Image: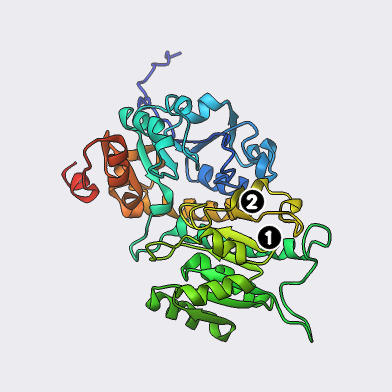
Amino acid sequence: MEALEPLEQRQRTSTLKRKTTIGLPVVNSIEDHRFPLTPEGAGMLVERGFRVLMESGAAEHIHYTDAAYARCGVEICTRTEALGCDMVIYLPMLSVADALKLRRCAMLFTFVQARPDDRGALAILLQRRIVTISIERIADEQGNRPFADILSEIDGRAAMAVASSLLADAIHGKGILLGGVTGIVPCEVTIIGSNMTACAAARSAIGLGATVRMFDNNTYRLRKALDMLGPGAIGSSLHPRVLAGALRSADIVIATDTDARDAAIDAATVESMKRGVICFDLTGNPGEVFPSLQVVDLDLASPSDNDPSAPGRLCYINAGNAVPRTVAMALTNAFISTLDENMVSDNPRDMNPHSMCISGGIRHGAVFILGRCVDPAVARLLGVRHFDVNLFLGLS
């Protein structure tokens, strides 16, 4: 019998590259409890080839369990593991201790404000060459800002929903409806500004039957807002006497960003406002419009805070914190579309933070790239040289 002769066979020798990891740490901030991804959204990233690692308990604030994420393919891990991923999504600014745990040259999606309190963490991000993206400044080719716009809309609608609830509270509120019924004059809502936040609040107020007065010195933006809102809104420039009159009769006051040099409401005007008036500051610098009022984060507010019998008035901020699950769903949509539009390769394994910054609208949100600061405000805060992002990436 003829002996069998062994033959050579090709053997696969290449090894698979590891998947790009996305980390979701627990938000340890008393100012911002928003979480960026729902279980379904995280699962969509897993289906696209990413590894998503979430710190245990990170989504408790939006009432999702670890098991809900695990069923969608998310790996539950420790904080150190979540912060050590290739891409980390953490909406408030990281602490110094957490910034030191980031992998060198990783990518961080966050909200960046050039505040003195954040100087230490920002310096560490720059030193460790973390590609830092301020998500509210990410823009598409048409100039639309998917994150900032949707969060602005949520803030406006949430503020009006909460204000309506506070007014209707029979124990701690006035026990009145925002919209009038037959024979009863409706409540008055005064809105400073005519941007997306202001329009969202006005649309909700008009839908509930309130009388809405909108003020802005940008007449072109104001005209566009009034055309969109229809006859339910009354518009005016920021004339001091007209605004003061509207504030005195208002049941709800909502301040948004305007082009006015000084939009602050002085203490005397505030004192002339109704007892039990509900004030919201939805500007980029919460608390500056009503400097004489105590600032209360809406997520930490209590119905008794706005009791009409109380001696003072309050100013609510961070309206989006009152609806964190809605925020999570909206941010999920924005993150999925942004990653899809900015992936420079169909395979997430081939992605790296620096190549993502060169593509699409992510460059508009860049703060630090390759150990260089491309944000002028942050550069001034840190005392470092500022590089133009377009020129810098073009030469990289």
Confirm whether residue 17 shows in the render. Answer: no
**Residue drawn where x is 39% and y is 78% of the image:** 219
How far across and down, in percent of the image, does residue 77 sit? 58, 28
Q: Residues within 10 Å of mark 1 (few under 14, many from 20)?
A: some
Quarter holding residue 379: top left
**Which residue carries the number 1 mark?**
162
How far across and down, in percent of the image, does residue 309 sit? 77, 57
Q: 114 above or below 251? A: above
- Number of numbered discs overlaid on the protein picture: 2
Do callouts 1 and 2 mark residues in contact (Cβ within 8 Å)?
yes
Toward the left, the furthest residue is: 395
Q: Which mark is residue 212?
A: none
Q: Amino acid at mark 1?
A: Val
Q: Is residue 330 or residue 32 the one in the foreground?
A: 32
Q: Amino acid at mark 2?
A: Leu
Q: 5 above or below 121? A: above
43 left or right of 180 in image: left
Confirm whether residue 198 shows in the render. Answer: yes
Q: Residues within 10 Å of mark 2 (few under 14, many from 20)?
A: many
Element on which disc 1 rests: helix
How far across and down, in percent of the image, does residue 157 sit? 60, 64
Q: Is residue 292 or residue 21 the one in the foreground?
A: 292
How far across and down, in percent of the image, does residue 45 sit? 51, 45
**Which residue carries the number 2 mark?**
298
**Residue drawn where x is 31% and y is 50% of the image:** 363
**Residue drawn where x is 54% and y is 70% of the image:** 191
Q: Is residue 390 or residue 127 the one in the foreground?
A: 127
Quarter holding residue 15: top left
Element on which disc 2 rests: helix
153 left or right of 388 in image: right
Q: CA distance from mark 1 to mark 2?
A: 9 Å
Q: Quadrant of the C terminus?
A: top left
